[in-house]
Amino acid sequence: MAIRINVFRSEHATGSERRQQIHAFYELLHTVVDFLAAMLFLVGSVLFFSADTTFAATWLFVIGSLFFGLKPTIRLARELHFLRIGAYEKMFERVDG
């Protein structure tokens, strides 16, 4: 008997109303972080056109990189949240082979 672990899948958004709320919250947070990271990189890129704003541009790139690193962290937090509330049924399945 083998166990297949099904995490990070969109079908986990279905189920109880609580599960749907959790999924929606983390998706919104993920999208906001993604948007902010992209904006930081865009503004940082524009600031690199002037030598006077290179320091600020570098910091925007560093902060944008941090935001891009937050994206997978948010997804992991969502899956751990599902596990914490006992939503195991769709994450683990028995595979007979």
Image (tube, helix red, strand yellow):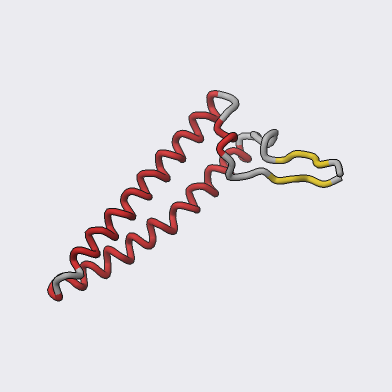
Determine which quarter of the picture holds residue 70: bottom left
Task: Find residue 91 and report its image quarter.
Answer: top right
Task: List x then y, in percent, for residue 58.
Answer: 26, 70
Residue pushed farthest top? 17
Find residue 8 and report its image quarter. Answer: top right
Q: Quadrant of the N terminus?
A: top right
Label tally = 0
**76 vs 48, nearest the viewer:** 48
For the point 78% across and 45% down, the residue is 3
Q: Residue at x 18, y 66 (%)?
A: 47
Q: Residue shown at 39%/44% (left/top)?
A: 31
Q: Is residue 38 above or below residue 82?
A: below
Q: Position of residue 42 (x, y in %)?
A: 26, 58
Q: Is residue 6 left or right of residue 71?
A: right
Residue 77: x percent and y percent?
Answer: 53, 47
User: Which quadrant would the C terminus be assigned to in this image?
Assistant: top right
Q: Position of residue 80 (x, y in %)?
A: 59, 44
The relative height of residue 25 versus residue 53 in the rendered view (above or below) is: above
Left/right of residue 65 with respect to residue 80 in the rendered view:
left
Is residue 32 toward the left or the right of residue 6 in the image? left
Considering every residue shown, the one lying at the far bottom of the view is 51
- Give the residue drawn at x 53%, y 24%: 17
